[in-house]
Image: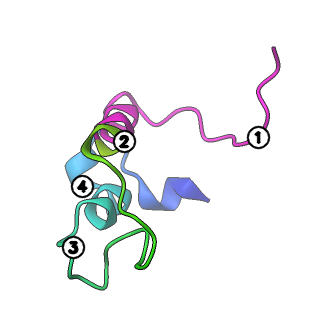
Amino acid sequence: DISRLVTPGKPMKSKLHEVLTANPNSEKLMPPKPKQALSSSQIDLISLWILQGAKNTICGKAKL
C-alpha cells in the first residue's frame, strides 16, 4: 500500500520522496540498480501529487 510511504501534503517528509531522491550511490535509491532512476520531471510530478494530498492511489486501467 503506497499510503504507508507518503505523508499527504508533505513531500519532504514522505519516505517515497526520500528514496526517489536519494544519493545515486545509496542503497536506498529507488528503483534499484540496474534500473534507471526516475527523471527529475517524473520526481517533480510525484512530489506534486504528494503535495496535493496523494488522493488517487488506485492503479489499473482507466475507464474512458
- Is 61 left or right of 30, judged from the image as shown? right
- The CA distance from mark 3 to mark 4 is 19 Å
Asked if the residue at tag 3 contacts the one at tag 2, i.e. Cβ–Cβ closer than 8 Å, the answer is: no
Estimate the x, y position of residue 25 in percent, counting from the top left.
Answer: 20, 81
Asked if the residue at tag 4 contacts the one at tag 3, i.e. Cβ–Cβ closer than 8 Å, the answer is: no
Q: Mark 3 points at which residue?
A: 24
Q: Mark 4 points at which residue?
A: 13
- Is 48 left or right of 61, judged from the image as shown? left
- The CA distance from mark 2 to mark 3 is 16 Å
- The CA distance from mark 2 to mark 1 is 19 Å
Q: Is tag 2's residue or tag 3's residue first in the polypeptide sequence?
A: 3
Asked if the residue at tag 3 contacts the one at tag 1, i.e. Cβ–Cβ closer than 8 Å, the answer is: no
**Viewport quadrant of the N terminus:** bottom right
- The CA distance from mark 4 to mark 2 is 18 Å
Classify 10 Å Cα crowding around label 2: few (below 14), some (14-19), many (20 and above): few
Residue type marked 1: Gly
Q: Is tag 4's residue or tag 2's residue first in the polypeptide sequence?
A: 4
**Viewport quadrant of the C terminus:** top right
Q: Mark 1 points at which residue?
A: 60
Q: Which of marks 4 and 2 is in front?
A: 2
Tell me which segment is drawn in magenta.
44-64
